[in-house]
Image: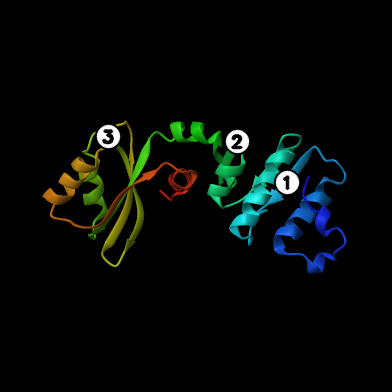
């Protein structure tokens, strides 16, 4: 299952990091455990090796329960059926990725970067756009403020957001729509305050 037949004759020291990960998975499976706990199983692997390890984990997951511990949320999204987000030892969200996106209360996120120094003013103004559910501070350094705007609905509200920015005479540095990811949900659920 782990695809190590072609390197069985080699010492573990001779293997690439990807094959070492495969051998580690095979070793963990030797006693036929019901549950496997994997901590950052794709850390340090190249993109091809990551895909191979993900495929192995998915195969094993059809027969076994796998708990994958990772801070690489795209990895969790690509590999796992169910996600649990833990903040300071407490579960703050749990479910399938689609469920977490629905529960987070917005359909998409706008990233806006402004030359400005007052987050409160930005937040209060942009919250007046009806489809904007939340204004989340991402960065506030050197007179530049980066925010995520959690938006709901199918309507593209970029024109309305741009209108608020233009009418406020703020200097716009960056403005784009992001698809809703586990990373944005994680940041929203674990941010301070």
Would you identify the image quadrant in which residue 180 lies? top left
Residue drawn 48% across the image and 48% down it: 183
Q: Residue 142: x and y, percent?
A: 29, 67
Q: Give SS at disc 2.
A: loop
Left or right relative to 182: residue 166: left
Disc 3 secondary structure class? loop
- Label 1 to label 3: alpha-carbon separation: 41 Å
Q: Which residue is mark 1?
A: 37
Residue at x-position 70% and y-position 59%? 18
- Spot occupied by residue 115 in the image (x, y as percentages of width and height): 23, 61
Q: Can residue 88 be seen?
A: no
Identify the residue under disc 2. 82
- The residue nearer to you, when weighing 47 against 40, is 47
Mark 2 vs 1, N-terminal side:
1
Classify 10 Å Cα crowding around label 3: few (below 14), some (14-19), many (20 and above).
many
**Numbered tag placed on residue 65 in the rendering:** none
């Amino acid at each position: 299952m782990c695809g190590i037949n072609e390197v069985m004759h080699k010492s573990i020291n001779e293997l690439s990091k990807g094959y070492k990960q495969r051998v580690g998975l095979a070793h963990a499976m030797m006693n036929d455990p019901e549950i496997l706990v994997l901590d950052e199983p794709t850390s340090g692997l190249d993109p091809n090796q990551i895909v191979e390890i993900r495929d192995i984990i998915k195969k094993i997951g059809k027969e076994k329960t796998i708990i994958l511990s990772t801070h690489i949320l795209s990895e969790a999204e690509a590999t796992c059926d169910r996600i649990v987000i833990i903040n300071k030892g407490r579960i703050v969200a749990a479910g399938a990725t689609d469920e977490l996106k629905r529960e987070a209360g917005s359909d998409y996120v706008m990233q806006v970067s402004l030359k400005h120094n007052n987050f409160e003013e930005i937040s209060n103004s942009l919250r007046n756009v009806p489809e904007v559910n939340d204004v989340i501070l991402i960065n506030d350094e050197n007179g530049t403020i980066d925010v995520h705007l959690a938006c709901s609905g199918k309507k593209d509200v970029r024109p309305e957001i741009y209108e608020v920015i233009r009418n406020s005479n703020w200097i716009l540095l960056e403005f784009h729509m992001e698809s809703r990811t586990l990373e944005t949900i994680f940041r929203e659920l674990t941010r301070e305050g």
